[in-house]
Image (spheres, rainbow, N blue to C red):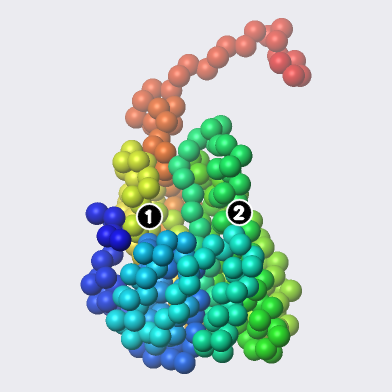
Amino acid sequence: MAQAPGFGFSEADLTTRQTVYRADLFKQSTVIVTGAGSGLGRGIAALFARLGANLAICGRNLDRLEQAAGFLRSLGADVLAVPMSIRNVEQVQAFFEAVRERFGGADILVNNAGGQFPQPALDYSPKGWNAVIDTNLNGTWWMMQSAARQWVEAGRPGAIVNIVADIWRGMPGIAHTCAARAGVVYLSKTVAVEWAPHRIRVNCVAPGCCESTGFAQYPPEGAATFDESNPLRHVGDEWDVAEAVVYLAAPSAKFVTGEVLTVDGGQQLWGDPWPTGRPPYFDLGRPPAAPERVAPERMVRGQ
């Protein structure tokens, strides 16, 4: 399947982009990357492949997954690619068994799979809300728990890196994913403590507006706000996220657990992205509406 025009890195970009990490950093290591068929997941998997890792990737779109697997193999990686849904517990468990059979188990889990759609919160249907929560929160948890159980059973250490989002000022226009990603952040902090005795580290990377093929799902008026979302006044890219993930997965972060590495150009301090497009009420270039006057006799509790 062709890359979305105008957004994200090409395979050539991912192959030649400079990195601060040494080429054999993950030699003889196995890394799971979910949602690796496109976007940030493909960029993350490409960096691990270039650093010598074996890869186990999964996703729901078979064509994208097979294309990504072929690309990752061209970078020298041994790749297991399994089409599946992280929402399905049985499929998740079968995936981990396949990883164990192929590679003897994984060393690192990168939970990148997820998704959302831009929509005002008043318009969410039960189906739309549940789909985002089930994928972004529940699916991430099934992957985390399955990985941890396999590591504990084998008596081996592990590292989990969850891709979340820049939730710190709320996320108008995608409130459902804000709720789910906030859940993953505090789930990660909790099990980072519970699983520390098992030598399992759990961290998160929270991208701000980092360009990938996923930008194509937003309307032009929404994407137009992304450059304005941070004080650096430009978006990030897939490599910004990939190198942050590698830092947390590698020995460089051997004393880091329960942390969130926010990669957002300062968005959490300053920005105002609107995936649906900024509503006229929030357009700072337009005069504010006059406040409604309330009669004194109505200024009582409940009125």
**Horizontal and vertical percent position of residue 13:** 25, 70
- Left or right: residue 161 versus residue 89 is left
The image quadrant where one finds the C terminus is: top right
The image quadrant where one finds the N terminus is: bottom left
Q: Say which mark, if any, is on residue 128.
A: none
| Mark 2 Cα shell of 10 Å, populated few (<14), some (14-19), many (≥20) | some
Q: Nearer the viewer, residue 133 or 231?
A: 133
| Viewer-nearest of discs 1 and 2 | 2
Q: Dividing the picture into quarters, in which one does residue 36 lie?
A: bottom left
Tell me which amino acid carries mark 1: Gly
- Left or right: residue 296 versus residue 286 is right
Residue drawn 34% across and 29% down? 285
Residue drawn 45% across and 42% down? 118
Q: In terms of secondary structure, where does tag 2 sit?
A: helix
Q: Write down the residue under mark 2.
A: 134
Q: Nearer the viewer, residue 231 or 212?
A: 212
Q: Say which mark, if any, is on residue 214.
A: 1
Tell me which amino acid carries mark 2: Asp
Q: In the rendered view, would you say 189 is above or below 122?
A: below
Whole-Å distance between the Cαs marked 1 and 2? 19 Å
**Horizontal and vertical percent position of residue 7:** 28, 56
